[in-house]
Image (cartoon, grey):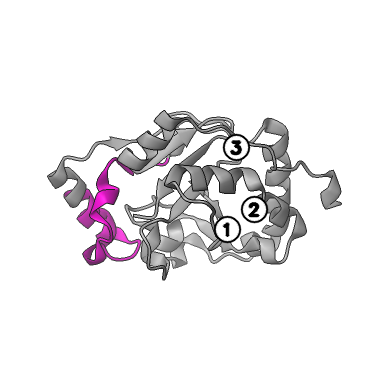
C-alpha cells in the first residue's frame, strides 16, 4: 500500500498530570483510544503483511520451550516495511512515552509484533529490560492490541509499584523459573497484581522496563 494513504499518528494524545503521577507511582498505566479504529485497522493490516512469511515458517509448538510457546515474535519490522515504519515512528506514541517518563524525547530500541497462538503457552512473569543493554532506569514499553480483548483471552498484568526494585537479576530470562521466582517475590512483597480486564484494539498500556 502507498504509505501516503495510511493514517498518520502525528496528532497529540493529551496526558493529565494525574496520569503521569499514576504511571510513575505504579510503574504502568492503561490509556484508552491511543489509536482510532481506522488507525489500528490499518496498522494491523500492515503488520500482518510484514509478518506473513515468518508466521507460516514458525517452528511447531511442541518443539519449542516455554518462552517459544508463549508467543511468536518478530522484531524491528520497520526496517523492511514502510507501512509498519510509518506507525512505529508516529509522533503520538513517542510523545506519550516522553511525557509519562518526564523527559524531553525518546529513542526507539525496537518494535516487536507478538502473536498469541491457539494452544500456545502462557507468558511467564518477566522484566522487559532484562533483554535491553541500556544503562538507565528510564525505559518504557508500549503494548497496543490489534484486536479487541476480554479477560478470558489473557490480559497483560502488572505487579504495581514493583518497578522501584530495579533489575531483579536473579529472576532470569522468560521461563518457568522466572514465573515461579517472580510470583514468589511479588507475593512476598505484597504487590497488587492488576490488569485492564477489557481492552479495545487501539487502546494501550505503557510500563517501565523494570
Q: Identify which residue is drawn at 13% across, 46% down.
A: 188
State whether residue 157 appears in this view.
no
**Residue 111 numbered mark, or none:** 1
Can residue 88 be seen by looking at this rendering?
yes
Which-is-in-front pick, marks 3 and 1? 1
* Numbered label attached to residue 88: 2
Tell me if label 3 and label 1 are in contact, CB under 8 Å. no
Residues in magenta?
156-184
Label 3 crowd (10 A; few <14 / some 14-19 / many >=20): some
* Coordinates of residue 42 in the picture (x, y in percent): 74, 42
Residue 147's tag is 3
Local secondary structure at mark 3: loop
Chain-order first, disc 3 or disc 2: 2
Residues tagged 2 and 1 counted as in contact (Cβ below 8 A): yes
Instruction: Tell me where residue 61 appears, x and y as whole percent.
Output: 48, 60
Residue 56 lies in magenta, yes or no? no
Secondary structure type for disc 2: helix
Left or right placement of residue 20 versus residue 192 in this view: right
Residue contact between numbered discs 3 and 2, judged by CB atoms under 8 Å: no
**Rendered residue at 34%/57% (across/down):** 127
Amino acid at each position: 500500500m502507498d504509505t501516503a494513504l495510511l493514517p498518520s499518528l502525528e496528532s497529540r494524545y493529551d496526558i493529565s498530570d494525574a496520569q503521569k503521577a499514576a504511571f510513575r507511582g505504579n510503574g504502568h498505566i492503561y490509556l484508552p483510544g491511543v489509536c482510532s479504529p481506522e488507525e489500528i485497522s490499518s496498522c494491523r493490516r500492515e503488520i500482518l503483511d510484514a509478518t506473513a512469511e515468518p508466521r507460516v515458517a514458525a517452528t511447531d509448538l511442541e518443539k519449542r520451550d516455554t518462552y517459544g510457546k508463549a508467543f511468536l515474535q518478530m522484531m524491528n519490522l520497520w526496517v523492511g516495511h514502510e507501512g509498519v515504519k510509518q506507525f512505529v515512528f508516529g509522533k503520538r506514541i513517542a510523545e506519550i512515552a516522553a511525557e509519562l517518563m518526564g523527559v524531553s524525547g525518546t529513542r526507539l530500541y525496537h518494535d516487536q509484533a507478538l502473536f498469541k497462538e491457539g494452544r500456545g503457552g502462557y507468558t511467564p512473569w518477566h522484566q522487559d529490560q532484562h533483554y535491553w543493554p541500556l544503562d538507565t532506569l528510564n525505559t518504557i514499553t508500549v503494548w497496543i492490541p490489534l484486536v479487541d480483548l476480554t479477560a478470558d483471552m489473557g490480559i497483560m498484568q502488572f505487579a504495581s509499584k514493583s518497578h522501584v526494585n530495579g533489575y531483579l537479576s536473579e529472576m532470569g530470562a522468560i521461563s518457568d523459573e522466572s514465573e515461579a521466582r517472580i510470583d514468589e517475590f511479588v507475593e512476598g512483597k505484597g504487590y497488587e497484581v492488576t490488569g485492564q480486564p477489557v481492552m479495545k484494539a487501539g487502546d494501550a498500556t505503557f510500563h517501565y522496563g523494570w
